[in-house]
Image (cartoon, grey):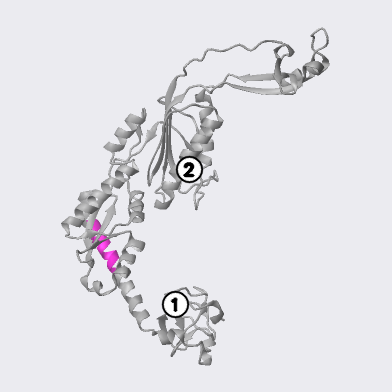
Amino acid sequence: MRERKGKTAVAPTRSELLLEIGTEELPAQFVAPALAELKQQAVRLFEVSRLCHGPITTLATPRRLTLVVEAMSELQEPAAIEVMGPSKAVALDPQGKPTKAAMGFAAGQGVPVEKLEIRATPKGDYLFAVKRDPGRKTRVLLPDMLLQLLAGLSFPKAMRWNETGVRFARPIRWLLALYDGKPVRVQFAGVQAGNLTVGHRFLSSGKPLVVKDFKSYMSIMQKTNVMVDPERRQATIVTQLDRIGQQKRGKLLRDGALVEQAVFTVEMPYAIAGSFDARYLNLPKEVLITAMKEHQGYFSLLASDGKLLPHFVAVTNMGAKQAKVIRAGNERVLAARLADAKFFYDEDRKITSEMRLSPPRACGPPDCAKRISPAGWSGSFRPCKASWGESTLCTTGSRNPWPTPLQNIICPSLRKISFRRAWPEEFFH
């Protein structure tokens, strides 16, 4: 048996780890949760692998998820596993020599019997086997660790796009993995990691660029028109929105969720103002705000009296040179959206409260049950109980068997299209 001796600690060498996952454009709502999970998974893996590290930073745009780990140790922390064996009275004979019990315990633990240690416990003196792991090099461990990190990321919806069968939010196009300035050889989803990255999809050459470390990475991002820090993008967007609001003599309608959506929709934000026909201001402003926000991701502008201005602000992923074309396109799309909103609003107003509360009755003429096939529609229609006033509408057509609120419904007996809100299920066939 031997006595334990102290060991002088040696300060480990520290290096930097840089990982970038390059993808097709990710949905805006996926990015922030993915960043949080990326950091949590990294911390967990480093802890399990006994790797010391400094601060961990995560950055992201719609096309990239980036992880930076500072001051990462080059060796695992040494580990000692202690296993308690038989008591001293059983393990040693009167002459102090190991018995078969001691030799069997040592063989089972894979340590020489002479390296077993005797320690005092509340139950008396017992033998302990101490297995020491000096630790492996970080560079040897990283390929498997990064593979686990990449495979462990989850998304609300994922897709497969090649023969590897890997599931990810969007197809992975490149991987950047550097440790101490040298590439980490890892392959995921058929993509081999290296030391290359790419810039903005439209505002750069698109050619792969060599990265040496995080400092050079940030320099490349700036030169290729990528603002990779989400906090910086957010500050830039808010500043641009406020400036446009002042130019239009209005006040921006603050919306934190819409700002976050804009942050994770662009790599280089550039806000532009557009206009829409003032006749739509006759609609309730909530209708217009909802149409602009939910369908297009536009910000609304309010006058000093709280009324809506006939302007909107869009955050684009392009520069000032394309602003005129982008503005015209956004105005054209919004005009169609607002026309739809006005139509649905006007149709809803045609239905009075009395008509909505009237008891349901059976669909009228027998010809309602016959099959019709107008252009773009094929379905069977039959009498139903969904009705109001003079209009009785229902369909079990193949396009949409159960109408939802504000969806168009065709009734062959009336030979017209109308709109209504969904009735309780018991009113249908």
Q: Mark 1: which amino acid?
A: Arg
> Is the C terminus in the top left, top right, bottom left or bottom right quadrant?
bottom right
Q: Where is residue 340 in the image (x, y as percent from the top left)?
A: 33, 72
Q: Where is residue 209 in the image (x, y as percent from the top left)?
A: 34, 33
N-term-proximal mark, 1 vs 2: 2
Please state if 168 lies on the left or on the right of 418 as rendered: right
77 up-or-down from 379: above or below? above
Disc marking residue 389 = none
Residue with the most extreme front position: 122
Please state if 364 lies on the left or on the right of 31 as rendered: right
Residue 413 can be seen in this image:
yes
> Is the N terminus in the top left, top right, bottom left or bottom right quadrant?
top right
Q: Mark 2: which amino acid?
A: Glu
Residue with the most extreme bottom position: 365
Q: What element carries label 2?
A: helix
Q: What stretch is highlighted in magenta?
A: 325-335
Q: Where is residue 169 in the image (x, y as percent from the top left)?
A: 47, 49
Which residue is at a point 70% across and 23% down the rendered structure image? 83
Question: Counting other residues with Cα less than 10 Å from the Cα at mark 2, is it few (<14), some (14-19), or many (20 or more)?
Answer: some
Which residue is at a point 46% across and 38% down the rendered structure image? 39
Please state if 271 lies on the left or on the right of 249 as rendered: right
Question: Counting other residues with Cα less than 10 Å from the Cα at mark 1, is it few (<14), some (14-19), or many (20 or more)?
Answer: few
Residue 190 can be seen in this image:
no
**Front one among 289 and 196:** 289
264 up-or-down from 251: above or below? above
Q: Name the residue under label 1.
A: 421
Measured Cα–Cα span from mark 1 to mark 2: 40 Å
Q: Name the residue under label 2.
A: 37
Q: Where is residue 200 in the image (x, y as percent from the top left)?
A: 31, 43
